[in-house]
Image (cartoon, grey):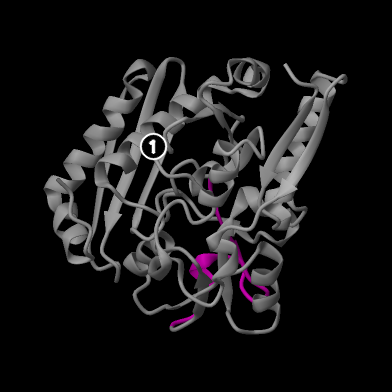
Amino acid sequence: MKNKIVIGTRSSKLALWQAEYIAGCIRKKYPEKTVELLHITTKGDKVLDVPLAKIGGKGLFTKEIETAMLEGEIDIAVHSLKDMPTQLPDGLVLAAVTERADAADAFVSIKYEKFTSLPKGARVGTSSLRRKAQLLHVRPDLQIGSLRGNVNTRLEKLEQGYFDAIILAAAGLKRLGFGAKIRELLPKSLCLPAVGQGVMAVEAREDDDAMRDLLQFLHDEKSWQEAIAERAFLARVEGGCQVPVGVHAVAADGVITVEAVIASLDGKQLFHDRESGPVSSAAELGRKAAERLLDEGGLAIMQEIGLLCD
């Protein structure tokens, strides 16, 4: 086992916080190891003037990093699990997922205390069709605009008056020290989060057994079971970040509950399902939720937006 570990990461402040967090954990656990970060620019970082839905699906923030790992330039990569495709490149695996932070979406506004305080026609910024569809389902009067860029840039857009409110992942805000800016955590009944939201994932080469063993101390089994269910749901509906689906799994006392939605782009149609069972059936429950939503009308929505589900 070599003494230097190179972590691949994007250069955004949130990505660097996450990579530095994992690096710090490794240094503390293995003080004899040298840990370095290699900054890698992804397609999602380069194209900032186009909505995510128009430039591709999952993998926008991971592909270049994964290529560097397969080519041996880096040893591991740290990602937000919600950015990762359900199908990883051959030769790569999820070696560990961290304990989940708050999975909720956060309502951030200068003028308004909570989502229900927004006036008719209020301007809301988000980069996510998932959020847009669910919010329009309950408030079709809202004017929802695309909001790209890192967390700091998005907050600046709010402060400059482009929006009355913006919606961001609570975990990212808290990690960067912006927790005080959160006016409200949106209830799951209003807006289900993205697959894996709040979880950091550490990716490694499949054949690097020593590295995978080294990383096991970072792994949180409860978060992993929840991720299995959520990623199984997403794999079945064959959606990426450009698809209006939300899913949230909670594991407790040997039981896992999966709640999911598929919505039309305008929010007028929204199909909801909830499944519960033993944690050993996490993947099966995720797929079952997907099948039910597809049968109820989700398949027609997917076909309408050009993503056929076999």
Would you call the spot at circle 1 few (<14 residues within 10 Å), some (14-19), or many (20 or more)? many
Quarter-of-image position of residue 301: bottom left
Residue position marked by numbered label 1 in the rendering = 230
Q: Quick check: can you spot residue 102?
A: no
Magenta region, residue range: 103-120
Q: Residue 249, relative to residue 11: is it above or below?
A: above
Q: Residue 199, relative to residue 217: is it above or below?
A: below
Q: How many marks?
A: 1
Tell me the element at label 1.
Answer: helix
Q: Position of residue 277 (x, y in %)?
A: 31, 21
Q: Position of residue 259 (x, y in %)?
A: 34, 40
Q: Quick check: can you spot residue 295?
A: yes
In the image, 309: left or right of 231? left
**Magenta-highlighted stretch: main secondary structure?**
loop
Instruction: Check the image and name the residue furthest to the right.
Output: 31
Q: Residue 48, relative to residue 294: is it above or below?
A: below
Q: Position of residue 23 (x, y in %)?
A: 77, 34
The structure residue drawn at horizontal position 28% and vertical position 47%, both measured from the top left corner, is 238
The structure residue drawn at horizontal position 62% and vertical position 35%, both measured from the top left corner, is 72
Assign the C terminus to one quadrant of the image. Answer: top left
Quarter-of-image position of residue 149: bottom right
Q: Residue 279, relative to residue 165: is it above or below?
A: above
In the image, 310: left or right of 135? left
The structure residue drawn at horizontal position 73% and vertical position 49%, both measured from the top left corner, is 16
Assess whether residue 108 is covered by the magenta stretch.
Answer: yes
Q: Position of residue 202 (x, y in %)?
A: 60, 33
Q: Nearer the viewer, residue 67 or 233?
A: 67
Amino acid at dot 1: Glu
Assess whether residue 159 is covered by the magenta stretch.
Answer: no
Quarter-of-image position of residue 302: bottom left
